[in-house]
Image (spheres, grey):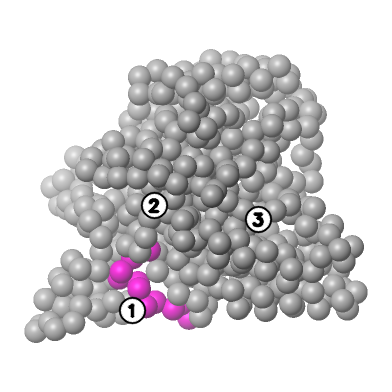
Amino acid sequence: MASIRELHEQLIKKERSAVEITQEALDRIQALEPKLHSFLHVTAQQALEQASAVDAKIAAGEEIGILAGIPVGIKDNMCTKGIPTTCASQILKNFVPPYESTVTQKLLDSGAVMVGKTNLDEFAMGGSTENSAYHITANPWDLSRVPGGSSGGSAAAVAADECVVSIGSDTGGSIRQPASFCGVVGMKPTYGLVSRYGLVAFASSLDQIGPFGRSVEDSAILLSAIAGHDPKDSTSLKVPIPDYAAGLKPDLRARGRLRIGVIKETFGEGLDSVVEQTVTKAIDQLQSLGAEIHIISCPRFRYGVPSYYIIAPSEASANLARYDGVKYGYRAPDVDNLLSMYTRTRSTGFGEEVKRRIMIGTYALSAGYYDAYYLKAQKVRTLIKQDFEKAFEQVDVLACPTVPTTAFKAGEKNTDPLSMYLLDLMTIPANLAGLPGLSVPCGFDDNGLPIGLQLIGKVLREDQLFQVAYAYEQSTTWHLRQPQIS
Ligand code: GLN
């Protein structure tokens, strides 16, 4: 499928209708879903209605926005009024939200066409989409491998052309990591840039919603549409939102001197040699485009994983207390008293990984352990933030691999949660510090699996990340390769 801008041109020139574009996406979904399973619900009827409304506007000579008529996938942890929102959990199996999340409302207002809700790890906990209670999503580049996670459905759907762009959420890497595994662009914005109202909470101090696209420009267009202050989210920032796509130039130095810091600690032990070589080449490419390359040390990065896996489960244990069989969602049948109702509901409604995190979090927050674990983890978080502050005194943007490996085989890491947690090594620090991070395709391994380059920016400098990624992308052909699914 074409880019947002190309489709927009086709629409306003009346070369194609929004219904035709939507139908093409729906046909592709129908053809590929038996193999891919990127979606939990396909909303074909609503999508065609939305598309017709766009066509009616065009026919009436009204001006349409850039996203009007563009097929979009939405991660199924964002509330959509009247449409099931399961978080890939049994506990929300029959939940149909009575309200719309701010992000999906903004997309509706922009005329974008939602083709469906995409698969994820249950409550966004995981890095492979294997923790979904419903089905496992396949990686479009190799169906025996995982698409990454937790926003694996959103990444796979875009890579496989089932929709043009999609929305994910990123608490410790869940947009950037699957973007890297699926060979698409994924951006986690600055904490507070995009409203979390209607996003089912996992770890509230880390969660952020962001875009996936096959190109930097598509992702930039989508972010401009969903960002912005929202009185319904108390952590939402009151800042002007630029048109991120408008300023993109293939010239890396279009806005003057650019210093890129390579995070020394992210190269070394645990990093696949092919990822190391590919990312190093990408950094050389940035240098040849005119960036100054500096080697930067962030010595406390390595404590990101241990502190995240205290903070995120702690917040999750509090956020998930609401699923008790009383307020909404699933209730276990055949119970004889209140306590057994709570216990049975939660022990059968939640999956293994979610329960593991609730237990870790409850333990870490309990009296007597709070100081030793939670408070300590928060102090480490501050130290990691200080590493970034120091780095950003010397450079404008930081670069490192997005993930230490390429996509692994489904089932490979199921028995060892720690090996899965370690994949978040390079993505977690940006969440802990609230900084924007982006993954852009930078090559392939010997098995033809995509590799991502991660760029981390200063607070609210999404524009700079898009600019660097765009100049890089335009000087390479990686984004033009497409998975052949047969
Ligand atoms: N893989 C990480 C986790 O399991 C990140 C998840 C996320 O960003 N939602 O917590």
Of 389 and 290, the residue lying toward us: 290
Return the x and y of residue 269 as percentages of the image width and height: 35, 19
481 shown above or below 58: above
| Residue at image location 42% in from the left, 54% down from the top | 137
Q: Which residues are magenta?
A: 88-99
Q: From the image, tell me which residue sits under label 2.
A: 129
Q: Residue at x 62, y 42 (%)?
A: 482
| Total marks in image | 3
* Label 3 neighbour load within 10 Å: few <14, some 14-19, many 20+: many
Residue named by callout 3: 164
Upstream in sequence: badge 3 or badge 1: 3
Q: Which picture quadrant has residue 323?
A: bottom left
Residue 425 drawn above or below residue 296 = below
Q: Nearer the viewer, residue 34 or 51?
A: 34
Main SS type for the magenta part? Answer: loop
Residue 94: say if magenta: yes
* Between discs 2 and 3, the one toward the N terminus: 2
**x, y percent for residue 258:** 69, 23
Which residue matches tag 1? 328
Question: What amino acid does circle 1 point to?
Answer: Tyr
Q: Nearer the viewer, mark 2 or mark 1?
A: 2
